[in-house]
Amino acid sequence: MSLTAEAGAVRRTNVRWSILVVLFVVTTINFADRATVSIAGPEISKALALSPVQMGYIFSAFAWSYVLAQLPGGWLLDRFGSKTTYCAALTMWSLFTMVQGTVGFLTGGAAVAALFLLRLAVGAAEAPSFPGNGRITSAWFPASERGFASAIFNSAQYFATALFAPIMGWIVHTFGWQAVFYFMGGLGLLMAMVWTKVIYGPKSHPRANQAEIDYIQAGGALVDLDADPAASKVEVDPAAQVDTLACLKELLSTRMLVGVYVFQFCINVMTYFFLTWFPVYLVTERHMTILKAGFVASLPAICGFVGGVLGGWVSDRLLKAGWSLSAARKTPIVAGMLMAMAMIACNYVESDMLVVFFMSLAFFGKGVGALGWAVVSDTSPKEAGGLSGALFNTFGNLAGIVTPIVIGYILQATGNFAGALVFVGASAAVALLSMLFVVGTIDRVTLSRSVAKTPA
């Protein structure tokens, strides 16, 4: 090689992987903040004399505002950019998390109302987080790496429980339930300061060289996404104009997509059971201490983390081996949902070890089958990918409203978790059936009634 060629061969930086690490850490804190009230739930219930139904409504409050704020959160990301909007969201949800620790100074209905309102505030503040993750990933990763990157930040939901459930359980046991909110809120505020120092768009990052920018841009990364918020729009036919309301009607009238939405709602029933009632189940039904419950809750989460990474890897391997898209996506989903139904077996065993085994198997299966976002990427119309994703996420997180409340009423009516576990296990069965018999062939949707051509 000549000296000239050697001089021109600049080693490419890999800053994008450090960006992914930050997204993983922030998303881990995000899900840990969602779980604070469930870890502290048994102690809060005793301290404030809350009924199961009241706890169910408090558990569900997060999802009410999270669902409603999805589209506004996406608009803010497009309007002000990922770095600014995400940092503001992280700061706000951390502050609201800290303030939850002060609810102990109130009593009766005032305490319940304050806690409910603060959970609403946390949910609204966290709404831009996952769209922000996707937006930053689109800017920093070429298409050939984007699936893996998305799987990594998505798996943070399992890692959060695995890491923080024991820590938060120990904090509640040692310092009281209020302390867990102060700890997690303070950690989020610290991370917000880190965010401002390390997150940039590709073209403005001080450590990313031109070779890396050229590489990711050639692979389809939207490197100008935050440099020019208007560039965040999907590149489609400039003469095509989507009628939003008509598009929503068309998406909701597409059988395949409706099946995908039902699937995501059902699989998230299990997600929100683990985020809300699972620690309460361990303490009240299995008579574990809150400290032991924190450690036990981490075991299914670890299995979910492993299952989530494995499911995505297996699906990609099946595609590369020549399987059809439908078969490659549905095979891990069906296997995962069959394993997820195993949690019903907890109603028929006495040993804590067997309970942990079946819960871990169920959560592992849920991870393996959690390919909803991949299916959305496969099916969303190119003219309305963002709208389709928002609709998908809205349906999925409606489970966060329904699940805690339904389980609260089941507990109040029966006095035990047997019916609740059947409800969650049956949801996995419905998810399986929806994917097999409603979704049908997985293919990209082509809009026919909601795209109009503007005059030339």
Image (cartoon, rainbow, N blue to C red):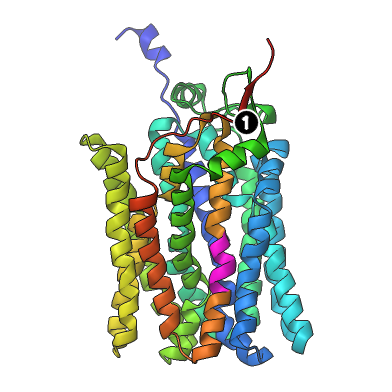
Of 236 and 181, which appears nearest the observer? 236
Name which residue type carries label 1. Ser
Quadrant occupied by the C terminus: top right
Secondary structure of the residue carrying tag 1 is: helix
Left-right relation of 117 to 233: right
Predominant SS along the magenta part: helix
In the image, is 123 to the left or to the right of 218?
right
Can residue 123 be seen here? The reply is yes
Hey, which residue is sitting farthest left in the picture? 321
Kindly indicate the quadrant of the structure image that contains residue 427: bottom left
Q: Is residue 195 left or right of residue 379?
A: right
Q: Nearer the viewer, residue 402 or 314?
A: 402
* Residue 397 percent across, percent down from the top left: 56, 59
User: In the visual, does 135 lie left or right of 454?
Assistant: left
Q: Which residue does the image show at 72% across and 64% down from the upper left?
A: 121
Instruction: Establish if 107 lies above or below 374.
Output: below
Is the residue marked by circle 1 packed among few (<14), some (14-19), or many (20+) residues within 10 Å?
many
Residue 153 picture location, percent across and down: 47, 50
Magenta stretch contains residue 375: no
* Figure quadrant of the N terminus: top left
Identify the image quadrant of residue 338.
bottom left
In the foreground, 204 or 345: 345
**Coordinates of residue 350 in the picture (x, y in percent):** 30, 90
